[in-house]
Amino acid sequence: MFKKLVEKNRSIRIFDESVELSQEDFLELVDLARLSPAGRNQLSFRFYLVKGEDLKKIYSMLHWAGAIPEWEGPKPGERPGSVILVITEDNTLSPLNAINMGIGIQSMMLGACEKGFGGCIIRAIDHTEIKKVLN
Ligand SMILES: Cc1cc2nc3c(=O)[nH]c(=O)nc-3n(C[C@H](O)[C@H](O)[C@H](O)COP(=O)(O)O)c2cc1C
């Protein structure tokens, strides 16, 4: 039942860090974004799977639960084992692109949840730093 999947798909912020997304699962999730509706059919995004050493480099550039400032975020061992970066060349992110991105990401979140993964959409990231570090 679709409602059950939506209910189950909460924003998870404590993980089993040893769990990584395989390339196959990653591509299946990207496909869900690709199949999602988009205004003007404008799907001008790229997806980049980050794990291992690269993830360690950018980990401090992700910001968790801004509404709970006293919480420092997941501890070592409880951090995500993989992160999917959603990349666009539209630096100012037009409203249409933002809506399209949100719809695509939610499809990916629901797909990940169905596969048994937990995740969290994170907007509060240090874009410029991540770009620099991951080249
Ligand atoms: C566009 C968007 C941006 C978000 N950015 C962040 C973020 O930067 N950091 C974070 O910890 N959670 C972020 N979240 C997760 C929300 O905080 C979360 O969805 C909300 O608290 C409701 O919790 P729930 O998803 O478990 O129902 C974001 C969610 C959305 C949809």
Image: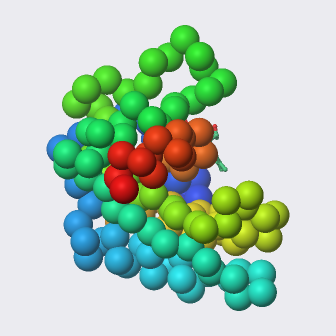
Quadrant hosting residue 27: bottom left
- Tally the numbered discs: 0
Residue 115: % across, % down: 35, 65
Question: Residue at the spot x=37%, y=78% of the render?
Answer: 28
Which residue is more in the foreground, 79 or 112?
A: 79
Which residue is more in the foreground, 43 or 116?
A: 43
Quadrant hosting residue 70: top right
Describe residue 134's horizontal placement relative to residue 62 as left or right. left
Question: Residue at the spot x=45%, y=18% of the render?
Answer: 72
Residue 79: % across, % down: 32, 35
In the displayed orientation, state which residue is furthest to the right.
95
Which residue is more in the foreground, 40 or 28?
A: 40
Describe residue 100's horizontal placement relative to residue 88 as left or right. right
Question: Residue at the spot x=27%, y=60% of the render?
Answer: 21
Relative to 126, say whether 96 is above or below: below
Quadrant hosting residue 42: bottom right
Residue 70 shows in this picture: yes
Relative to 37, say whether 86 is above or below: above
| Colouring scheme applied when the structure was drawn | rainbow
* Ligand 1 placement by image quarter: top right
On-image quarter of the C terminus:
bottom left
Residue 85: % across, % down: 45, 58
On-image quarter of the N terminus:
bottom right
Describe residue 48's horizontal placement relative to residue 71 as left or right. left
Residue 2 shows in this picture: no
Relative to 58, say whether 4 is above or below: below
Describe residue 77's horizontal placement relative to residue 103 as left or right. left
Which residue is more in the foreground, 134 or 9?
A: 134
Residue 3: % across, % down: 61, 63
Question: Residue at the spot x=78%, y=87% of the render?
Answer: 40
